[in-house]
């Protein structure tokens, strides 16, 4: 595959993409300059509409046809390209480097071996939660090394790739329900099977709107999707947590932690421990 790049003003982007589509050229994408922002509960971004856009057109034919394709693009767009690069990446896989959580555990693909470490077999297929982020690493280390999961039931809200559910099962949990509003069931169950785990159930849907999706109560509830979402789920969590059950909350940022903590405590919970890496906070409540 070859990628031909063009530079153009932001205001011409939509018209240019439409012009290419009229000429049956659809494999088009662009890089929009972004300004990273913060909000009450984490990070966001703003598109910088006053800067130029890098528009990229992919050519998937043989190299011999590249010059003709470039000439065709020039006739259509009435502009010269700024760069042509060959791209041979395989986007059907989502490889990632081994993640050494600590001296005992490593997350890696099934074909890698690490002497002296317990490996969590994992193949990413694009869902949230690979273990790369600070919040995911902190919560994984707590599940695997510190918290009592033996024979406990677990509800994993916003499971993504299922990595937290897998860790809970490896730590001795008896039953895990992994919930996500997106259809991540295949990825969750694939990664569970790679670790020979058969006590994880994937549930897809909005559990706040459909009470029939998850009816049981649990000893532990995990939620690693941000402060605003945690507040939104607190009534549900309160109703589905066993007496003396525990909440493991992550994906929080230090500048809103006190606010989220106060909200959780308003439901009768008490902060047991707080863990922080950079600005990201993970906490256990009882």
Image (tube, rainbow, N blue to C red):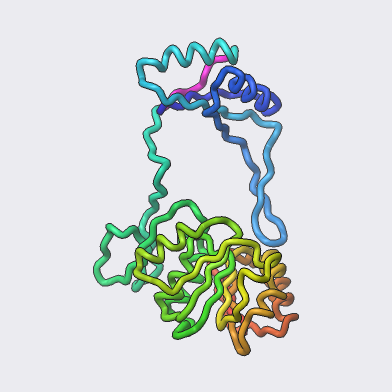
Q: Is residue 275 left or right of residue 119?
A: right
- Above or below, 8 relative to 259: above
Please tell me which residue is depicted at 41% across the width and 49% down the height of the picture.
Answer: 94
Task: Judge by depth and name the residue closer to the eye, 19 or 254.
Answer: 19
**How many marks can you see?**
0
Please tell me which residue is depicted at 55% across the width and 26% down the height of the picture.
Answer: 26
Please tell me which residue is depicted at 42% across the width and 13% down the height of the picture.
Answer: 67
Which image quarter holds the N terminus? top left
Hey, which quadrant is residue 207 in on the image? bottom right
Residue furthest to the left in view is: 115
Specify start and end residues of the magenta stretch as a single range. 79-85
User: Is any part of residue 132 visible from this angle?
Assistant: no
Which image quarter holds the C terminus? bottom right
Hey, which quadrant is residue 144 in on the image? bottom left
Q: Is residue 69 one of those drawn in magenta? A: no
Please tell me which residue is depicted at 53% across the width and 15% down the height of the picture.
Answer: 73
- Above or below, 270 relative to 73: below
User: Is any part of residue 40 visible from this angle?
Assistant: yes
Q: Position of residue 68 (x, y in %)?
A: 44, 12
Task: Judge by depth and name the residue closer to the eye, 31 or 124.
Answer: 124
Q: Position of residue 11 (x, y in %)?
A: 71, 26
Hey, which quadrant is residue 117 in on the image? bottom left
- Above or below, 250 relative to 23: below
Q: Position of residue 31 (x, y in %)?
A: 57, 35
Q: Position of residue 278 (x, y in %)?
A: 55, 64
Residue furthest to the bottom in view is: 244
Q: Is residue 193 left or right of residue 6?
A: left
Q: Is residue 50 left or right of residue 110?
A: right
Task: Judge by depth and name the residue closer to the eye, 122 or 208.
Answer: 208
């Amino acid at each position: 595959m070859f990628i031909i790049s063009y530079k153009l003003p932001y205001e011409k982007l939509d018209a240019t993409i439409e012009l290419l589509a009229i000429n049956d050229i659809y494999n088009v994408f662009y890089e929009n300059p972004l300004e990273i922002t913060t909000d009450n509960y984490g990070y966001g971004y703003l598109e910088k509409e006053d800067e130029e856009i890098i528009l990229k057109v992919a050519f998937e034919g043989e190299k011999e046809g590249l010059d003709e394709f470039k000439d065709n693009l020039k006739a259509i767009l009435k502009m010269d390209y700024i760069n042509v690069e060959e791209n041979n990446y395989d986007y059907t896989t989502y490889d990632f480097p081994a993640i050494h959580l600590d001296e005992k555990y490593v997350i890696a693909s099934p074909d890698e071996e690490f002497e002296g470490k317990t490996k969590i077999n994992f193949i990413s297929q694009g869902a949230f939660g690979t273990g790369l982020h600070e919040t995911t690493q902190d919560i994984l280390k707590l599940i695997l090394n510190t918290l009592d999961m033996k024979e406990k039931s677990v509800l994993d809200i916003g499971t993504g790739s299922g990595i937290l559910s897998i860790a809970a099962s490896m730590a001795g949990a008896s039953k895990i329900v992994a919930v996500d509003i997106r259809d991540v069931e295949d990825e969750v169950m694939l990664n569970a099977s790679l670790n020979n785990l058969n006590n994880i159930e994937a549930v897809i849907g909005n559990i706040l709107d459909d009470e029939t999706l998850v009816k049981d109560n649990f000893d532990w509830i995990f939620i690693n999707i941000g402060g605003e979402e945690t507040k939104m789920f607190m009534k549900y969590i309160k109703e589905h947590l066993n007496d003396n059950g525990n909440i493991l909350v992550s994906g929080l940022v230090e500048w809103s932690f006190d606010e989220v903590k106060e909200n959780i405590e308003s439901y009768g919970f008490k902060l047991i421990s707080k863990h922080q890496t950079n600005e990201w906070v993970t906490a256990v409540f009882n």
